[in-house]
Structures are given as structure tokens and as C-alpha cells.
Image (cartoon, helix red, strand yellow):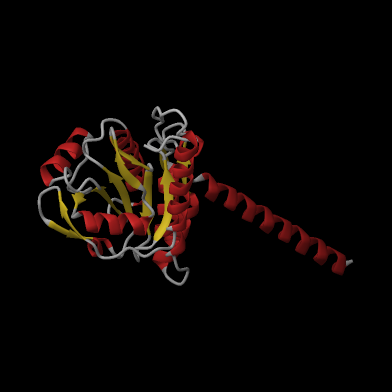
Amino acid sequence: MIPSLAAAALGLALLAAPAGATTDIAASADQALATSRAAEGNTIGDHALIDHRGRPLRLSQFRGRPLVISMIYTSCHYTCPTMTHTLSNAIEAARKALGSDSFAVLSVGFDSRVDTPPMLSAFARQQGIDTDSWPFASGPRETIDRLAKEIGFTFFVAPRGFDHIAQTTILDAQGRVYRQVYGEMFDTPLVVEPLKDLILGRAASLTSVDGIVNRVKFFCTVYDPNTGGYRFDYSIFIEFFMGLTSVILVAIFLIQSLRRRRST
């Protein structure tokens, strides 16, 4: 990973740096963050990859719903497994709250030389990932480089493997970079809230029943820090009903008072 104060703020693992190299490493981390942020709004190309079963996979397959992309390399011993495990918890919460088919998730191995289908399968199995609903894929170096550039993902070869920004990228249904999530460990809402916005918020139209239902879900689906998951908060309906009842009672009181004044 890229060690520096900026990297620490992103939740990246800190590695020992040679004496005198701190400034250069900090500049690299700052640049990685700037590159990542600048990618928001980019539209991702229809890149051709090979999945963990050795089958062709194109990014266009995921168009029409949000896509969560996690860049990893399979020979990583700490950061990538930790990041995948953290993301797995967030994805589980998101699927329970938003629907299992409302968005997709994809892990991409960026070490083209090593991240073969058998290695991707073994990595996913070690992290306990159900690859039927969460594919792992990789591709030629040129393809990976183009994808990494489009999503603002920085990586380069280092003595212990790779230095890279710990980044999870959320695309909207049109394949545009909507949100970046940083760190190998992050809070569940950092992933779920952007997905909730894309699935229930921005796409919801109040001109249809489904749109109205989605808006209700958007406001009433809330994060519960005690359970680490999301739940439907009925208290919002109770508060609305009580508020509406109060307004009606005040209106009745005012109407009755007006009538009494007129009768006298």
C-alpha cells in the first residue's frame, strides 16, 4: 500500500519506508487520492475480462443497475483479503435492505500475470464469497490499465507485491463513477448509502406507484449501528400520523371557534 499521512487518512496499511523517502511517498499518496477523486463522473468502457470460471465477462453485462467494483490482487496477504471481507459485510447489508438483484458487485484482479481464473476462484473461496452472485475477473494488462485509469485506481509494483490505493468504486446504472469508498476497513453505510441513493432515491419517480414506494423505502430504510444492518423504521410513519392528527385537530378547533364567533 502507499504509506503516508494521506494514506493513513484513507485507511491504508502503512509500510516501513526507506529513510528520506517519506516526502516522495506522501506525494504519491496525495496524487493517488487526487486521481481517484477526479475519476468521479467518468463513464467506464465495455472492457472484456475473463471470470473466475474462465468464461468471458464484459462490463456491459452490468449496465442497467449500479455496480460495485473492488480492485484486488490474489497474492495479497492482508489488505485485499481484509478489504474483501469488509466489503462482503456491506454487500450483505445492502442486499437485505435494497434487494439481492438491485445492484451487482465485481472484484477485478489487477495483477494480470498471476490473477488467473484458478487463483481468483481460490481467493474468493478463502474469503467466503459466493461467486454465483459476486464474480471475480481479470484480463490483459492493457485492459486492466484502461479500467484502472477510468475509475481512478492507482497501483504499481513494489518489493512486497503492489502498492495501491484501497478503493471501492460504485458505478451508477449507466456505468459512471458515482462514489469512491476508501480504506481496507470502512463503515457499512459508506457503501450502502450511495447504493440506496441510486436505487431508491435518484431513480424514483413520484408519477408511479413503484416510484412512490421507492421514495418511502428511501426515507424509512435506516442504518442500525447496534446490529450493523439496515431496518425499516416505522417510527417515521408514527411521527407523520401524529403530526397530521395534530394539524387536523388544530384545524377542527379553529373552524369550531370561527363558527361560535359567527353564531354570537
Tell me the residue at 25%/48% (across/down): 110
Quadrant holding the C terminus: bottom right
Where does residue 234 sit, x and y in percent of width and height? 49, 46
Quadrant holding the N terminus: top left
Query: Does residue 97 show up?
Result: no
Q: Nearer the viewer, residue 53 or 19?
A: 19
Q: Nearer the viewer, residue 252 or 59?
A: 59
Tell me the residue at 15%/37% (across/down): 122
Q: Nearer the viewer, residue 259 or 154?
A: 154
Tell me the residue at 35%/66% (across/down): 174
Query: Quick check: 207 above or below 72?
Result: below
Q: Nearer the viewer, residue 257 or 149?
A: 149
Tally the numbered discs.
Answer: 0
Q: Residue furthest bottom?
A: 207
Q: Residue furthest right?
A: 264
Where does residue 206 sit, x and y in percent of width and height? 47, 68
Q: Residue furthest front?
A: 20
Q: Quadrant of residue 152?
A: bottom left
Query: Does residue 144 show up?
Result: yes
